[in-house]
Amino acid sequence: IGAVIASLLTLPKDSLSKEARYSSQEVLEIFIKEKDTIFKRNRSYLPNLFGPLYDKGSLESLAIRLYGDTPFKAALIPTAAIATVKTTLEAKVISSCNPQEDYL
């Protein structure tokens, strides 16, 4: 969730903008309004088994609405996120300033 907040706060308004698309107040309002989407539990998730805790489809549709086609590397300032590699359960740092990573 921290990565979502950080990426929303550093997302530019458009490809030429140096201004953030969302203010901190707007991000707070997004979380309040979309809490049921953001935290929608995956019905097939069972504790201690592989699989996402939250519903992937809900999060993906929200991400498309919020980010559009703006890639992570477009962040206004260097931004990082921590992800878990599903197959190995290892932590991975994803950086907006790494040219080898290109995430939408």
Image (spheres, rainbow, N blue to C red):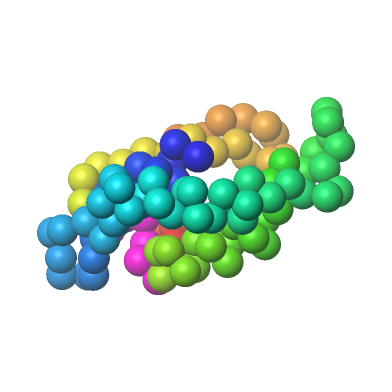
As drawn, is 56 to the left or to the right of 76? Answer: right
Q: Residue at x 54, y 38 (%)?
A: 83
Q: Position of residue 43 (x, y in %)?
A: 83, 50
Q: Residue at x 39, y 46 (%)?
A: 28
Q: Position of residue 16 (x, y in %)?
A: 15, 69
As drawn, is 57 to the left or to the right of 26? Answer: right
Q: Residue at x 48, y 35 (%)?
A: 82
Q: Position of residue 44 (x, y in %)?
A: 86, 48
**Observer-nearest residue: 15 or 61?**
61
Location of the C terminus (image quadrant)? bottom left
Q: Is residue 73 magenta?
A: yes
Q: Position of residue 9 (x, y in %)?
A: 30, 48
Q: Which residues are magenta?
A: 69-74
User: Relative to 47, does residue 75 appear above or below in the rendering?
Assistant: below
Q: Quadrant of residue 84?
A: top right
* Res 97 visible: no
User: Relative to 51, does residue 18 appear above or below in the rendering?
Assistant: below
* Figure label count: 0
**Observer-nearest residue: 9 or 102?**
9
**Observer-nearest residue: 82 or 100?**
82
Q: Residue at x 33, y 53 (%)?
A: 26
Q: Is residue 28 magenta?
A: no
* Res 31 visible: yes
Q: Quadrant of residue 78?
A: top left
